[in-house]
Amino acid sequence: MPGVFLPQGNARSYGDSCMLHEGTVLSTRFMNRFIAFDGETGIIRCEAGVTLAEILSVVEPQGWFLAVTPGTKFATVGGAIANDVHGKNHHVEGTFGAHLTQFELLRTDGSVRLCSPTENAEWFAATIGGLGLTGLITWAEFKLKRVSNSAVNVENIKYQNLADFFALSQESEQDFEYTVAWVDCLASGDQLGRGHFSRANHARVTQPKPAPSQHTLTIPVDPPVSLVNSISLKAFNWLYYHRQREKRVTQTTHYDPFFYPLDHVQNWNRMYGPKGFLQYQCIVPMEHSEAAICELLRRIGRANYGSFLAVLKVFGDVPSPGLNSFPRPGTTLALDFPYKGAQTMQLFDQLDEVVVQAGGALYPAKDAHMKPQHFKRFYPNADQLESFRDPGINSSFWQRVMEPST
């Protein structure tokens, strides 16, 4: 399809939603200027290629923080809108799109639309979580959050099984803004789903702010094979689970290690070897969460094929303004898997069976295998998004799920 292109931010999505095999990928990173910032109201306007890290460098010293941030600060504002990203505080603040006030959308026919909840509202909704397909976002304006201290008071709780996880999530919902858990994806039996539950709030104004770490780890070379295998995974998960002797440990930390732990490990993806990795992230409704997550972990454990980084989080009922956003009430599980070709895809098919039966969904920003029939089931407004898609814009993901070969 000559002439077709895809706007791409900083390429931090793990699947093919930010890729276009036949066409032109247009980087927006050169669109990296700040336009306006009101230090009294916390309203910021910037071009779509500005990263969250660049925003934090400007606003954090002035007592502001991102209302919603994903697990990397190297995502761009345009990417955050396109994927309607979520964070550890979804049960309080919802998605990134919930804090947008307006943005400008440039179409390939030369038309420009100012989109907000009241102006071109249907384009506003279609673009939030619209995977970059409705047009090129040139700039965006959104609300930040006032914080008295950007540091966070974190409580890490070692828990025994999934029942403990759900009890901790419910207990923490009212008093803690940020909640997330690391899961030992290979534990079984009475310990299925065991892990570390982290809950946190921003520190008080009187507490000293820890300095950011000056140390970063680097994986300097590509190993010939994946370093993530059944032996290393079992050893790592056992050591990581038992790293904390006490059941509860509290600490005050700089925001970086809590929100962005992987950003301090340069080229961390190299540990998966030359074939790389795929991430599997799903969400299942609360009424089926415990049974579905149990079954997902059982199938992963039986395959003896899991992840160092298995993350479990309960989403709240704060609605997203996006037409096709992934976040919805329920429990989300995300894991990285070293890519092993057909073996990986067969496992994903087995996991899909559980998600479909539970009435859940997969996350397009982290996907490289979703079937077209499943996508339309997970996202019943997909055809409506197609009607808003700019005919000059496409992606490998969209071609895969909406334009399957016959």
Image: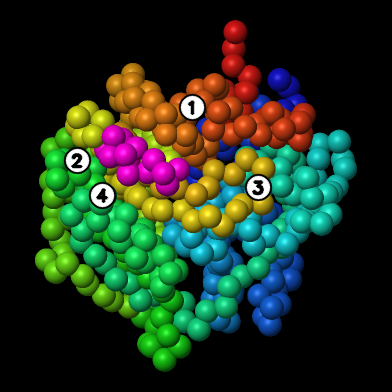
Q: What crowding class fits label 3: few (fewer than 14 Cα within 10 Å), some (14-19), or many (20 or more)? A: many
Q: Is residue 225 visible?
A: no
Residue 383, numbered circle: none
The 10 Å Cα crowd at callout 2, few under 14, some 14 to 19, many 20 or more, is many
Q: Quick one: SS at disc 2?
A: loop
Q: Are marks 3 and 4 in contact (CB under 8 Å)?
A: no
Which callout, 2 or 4, points at the residue further toward the start of the chain? 4
> Mark 2 to mark 4: distance in Å?
13 Å
Residue 209 drawn at (x, y percent): 39, 83
Q: Amino acid at mark 2?
A: Leu
Q: Which residue is mark 1?
A: 370
* 1 and 4 marks in contact (CB < 8 Å): no
Residue toward you, 105 or 353: 353
Check if mark 2's residue and mark 1's residue have beta carbons within 8 Å: no
Q: Which residue is mark 2?
A: 186
Q: For the magenta stretch, what is the residue range? A: 285-297
Q: Earlier in the sequence, mark 3 or mark 4?
A: 4
Which residue, given by chain and number where applicable, does mark 4 sit on? 162
